[in-house]
């Protein structure tokens, strides 16, 4: 009789242990944060300026694009696009960031002629559906090296949290108060690249945060490669002209 009771007692303990184990797993799962913004925080722990684990040495690939789709939703892809570095208002770069303005002049025509560059551009207009704090995302890569050239991210009120994350990693930002319009820009410099967050109100008076990352070494590489290609084409035309007569 005691043996039977002992077996029942052991069976009861086993059942109770299983119940406790299930409860632990459930509470642990519920305790995990699924907020995409927390993932963004973790991504900024990498070296250099990054966005969703993409940094200055990331090379664009099908795998990278697939991962971005999972995080930001469907995309639009373009190749050979203009590359305009200007932001906020006309003359902003010339006044406050002349080195970027000099690069922008090399990339674009002074008379406004459309110049297309050897780039890969990804655009995400519906990232909100993935519950991330981004209204609009634009990522531009060099089609020579496949490395990033320029990232642009538009956020609403969550942008304040993004500023806190970036400040904790890179320190206090340089501040620019706009002269032409009502707004402020914060910027950081690392490895000659720059990250800017511009803050202004939308038409309803709500704050908007526009984050731009300029990967300066990659931009310079693009300019140099395109100049070499242009010179090569020019030399070939001259050679063809000499041999034609």
Image (spheres, rainbow, N blue to C red):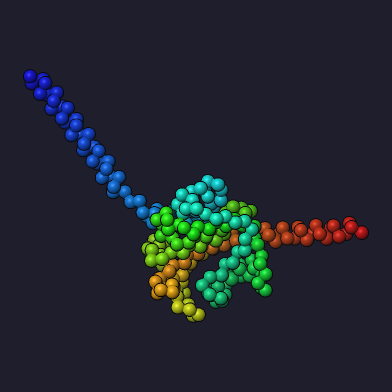
The N terminus appears in which quarter of the rendering? top left
Q: How many marks?
A: 0
Q: Relative to the observer, which residue lies in front, 45 or 106? A: 106
The answer to whether residue 170 is visible is no
Q: Residue at x 8, y 21 (%)?
A: 2
The C terminus appears in which quarter of the rendering? bottom right
Q: Residue at x 39, y 61 (%)?
A: 165
Q: Residue at x 24, y 41 (%)?
A: 24
Q: Is residue 15 above or below residue 53?
A: above
Q: Quadrant of residue 234?
A: bottom right
Q: Position of residue 198 (x, y in %)?
A: 46, 70
Would residue 61 appear left or right of 5 to someone viewing this image?
Answer: right
The answer to whether residue 101 is visible is yes
Q: Position of residue 155 (x, y in %)?
A: 43, 64
**Residue placed furthest toward the bottom:** 179
Would residue 78 appear left or right of 44 to someone viewing this image?
Answer: right
Q: Residue at x 43, y 72 (%)?
A: 202
Q: Is residue 81 above or below residue 183?
A: above
Q: Position of residue 68 (x, y in %)?
A: 49, 51
Q: Relative to the observer, which residue lies in front, 163 or 194? A: 163
**Residue placed furthest toward the right:** 245
Q: Position of residue 11 (x, y in %)?
A: 17, 27
């Amino acid at each position: 009789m005691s043996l039977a009771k002992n077996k029942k007692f052991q069976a009861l303990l086993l059942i109770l242990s299983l119940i406790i184990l299930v409860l632990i797993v459930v509470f642990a799962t519920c305790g995990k944060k699924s907020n995409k913004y927390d993932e963004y925080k973790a991504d900024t722990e990498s070296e250099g300026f990054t966005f969703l684990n993409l940094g200055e040495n990331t090379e664009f690939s099908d795998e990278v694009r697939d991962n971005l789709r999972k995080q930001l939703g469907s995309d639009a892809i373009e190749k050979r696009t203009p590359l305009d570095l200007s932001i906020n208002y006309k003359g902003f770069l010339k006044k406050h960031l002349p080195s970027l303005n000099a690069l922008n002049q090399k990339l674009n025509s002074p008379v406004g002629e459309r110049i297309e560059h050897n780039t890969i551009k990804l655009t995400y207009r519906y990232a909100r559906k993935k519950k991330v704090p981004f209204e609009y995302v634009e990522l531009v890569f060099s089609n020579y090296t496949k490395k990033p050239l320029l990232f642009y991210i538009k956020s609403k009120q969550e942008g304040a949290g993004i500023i806190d994350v970036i400040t904790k990693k890179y320190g206090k930002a340089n501040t620019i108060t706009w002269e032409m319009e009502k707004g402020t820009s914060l910027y950081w410099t690392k490895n000659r690249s720059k990250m800017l967050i511009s803050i202004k109100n939308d038409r309803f008076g709500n704050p908007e945060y526009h984050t731009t990352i300029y990967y300066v070494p990659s931009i310079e590489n693009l300019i140099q490669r395109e100049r070499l290609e242009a010179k090569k084409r020019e030399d070939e035309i001259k050679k063809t002209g000499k041999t034609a007569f």
